[in-house]
Image: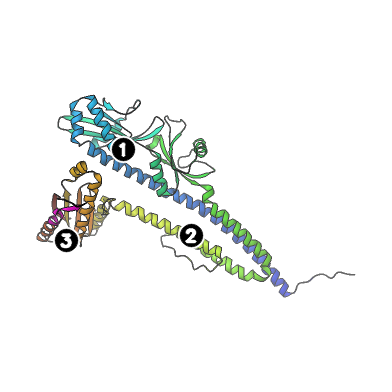
Amino acid sequence: MRILPVTLGFRGRLVATMVVLVVLVSLAIGALFMAYLFEEERTRALTQLDIGERLTEEVMARRTNLELSRLSVVVQDFGFLSAIASGDRATMESALNNHSQRVDAAFAVLMNQDRQVLASNFAGTLPELSNATFESAIHQGYGRQWLALNDNGYELLLVPIQAPGLRAWVLAGFALDSETAGVIARLSDTAVLFRARTSEGGNYQAFATSPGVDDAQQQALLETASGERYLDNPQFFTRVVPLSGQDNQLQALLLISRDASLQRYYQRAGEVAMLMLGILVAAALLALYLARSLGRPVLQLADYARAVGSDTPAEPPPVQGSGEIRQLNQAFTDMVRRLREREEQIRYTATHDDITGLGNRNALVQFTRSLFQEHRHCSVVGLRLDELSEINDSLGLELGDRVLVGMARRLREAFTDAQLLARTGGDEFLVLLPALSSGQLEQRARTAAARLREPLLLDGTPFSLRISVVTMELPED
């Protein structure tokens, strides 16, 4: 019996061609899709680390500003100055202990004009401060230096004390602790580890971490080879943020778990593998349908992902694919939204005062630069709370902050047509108005001052405010 060769007709060849085409296209799209997803997850982690690095620098800068504002109150305190003037070591140490606790300093040191220690509550031998730190304190009002002491990292702030017949230095050390690491971790959505080394070329030691980094992971990170910007670690995407300048004595490590970051990639890989298996089984009947329902949505999502980084905001594509494709589209959309929200938050923080919500110095600089570039004119009212420092010293910083908030509220009510309301100093405010005549400006200033001097009711207690007011015209003045 002779076996006849099997021949395929046109329909058979067409089906076979479509099956082969579907298989090849599916394999190609699957490979591209997985490669893109892997790179996207890696890029997302690195982008998150970039944002985390900027947030770390911003948090440390704001932390320094807060510490300096507290120290400035201390060095002007009459009781503290009296204790120094007494020359009695016990009195100076008692005052130093009280005020270091007041500003949340880990330790404090009082030195005379010749840099000799008068009083100290530091347990151990204090390393010699650099001349650059003292020079900075003389010219800028403070000097800052980062040091690793007693297996801990500290930010040292040196502030000069200048009073009639009295010249001295106060040095305060603020510890980099787990609380600080936790704040940065929550804001940047990363894990944070602080590490330090006591000598050039020595081994780093971890002294504070955010929750989520166990001892074994800490040890692995400390033993990993360190690059200038990252650690070559198989468990984490890393970013090295130097805190102490070029000597790299103190560093913050930002960490994102590779397994957690790539979990979505592995999930998608399994889904795509199952989907391709289904395509191979049903290719004869569903080739055209699957090519359209899978190929086009994936390409749309790829175009959408590539357009995310462009200057023109990308709109999510109207995906009509399967549930997995819809989930991926939603994931991309949510990721872009979160990135934009974080960037917007950073922009807002850079130009607004934390306490009052008014503009800050950056906002004022931006506005005036635009004003001069466009050759526009405006009128300026400057106001100063004359007794804010006394309120802070006698009643506490919290009540002082509430006075500032009340002041800001009254400014908004008094200057509804203001082009910019800004808090430019601890107790100073500027109001930029449309150009007014001298008489109109003086009248507006007097009316606003009268309103601002009215007693401010806080917890049922009226506070009378002393306000100093000045006016000027820009750019004439």
Residue pictured at 22% horizontal, 27% vertical: 91
Q: Hey, what amino acid is under mark 3?
A: Ala
Between 212 and 472, the one lying in front of the other is: 212
Q: Relative to 318, is 142 above or below?
A: above
Q: Which residues are magenta?
A: 448-457
The span from disc 3 to disc 2 (Cα, nearest Å) is 47 Å
Residue pictured at 75% horizontal, 74% vertical: 9
Q: Earlier in the sequence, mark 2 or mark 1?
A: 1
Q: Residue furthest front?
A: 460
Q: Nearer the viewer, mark 3 or mark 1?
A: 1
Camera sees residue 456: yes
Residue receiving disc 1: 104
Q: Relative to 260, is 302 above or below?
A: below
Residue 332 circle label: 2
Residue 435 circle label: 3
Q: Position of residue 192 (x, y in %)?
A: 44, 43
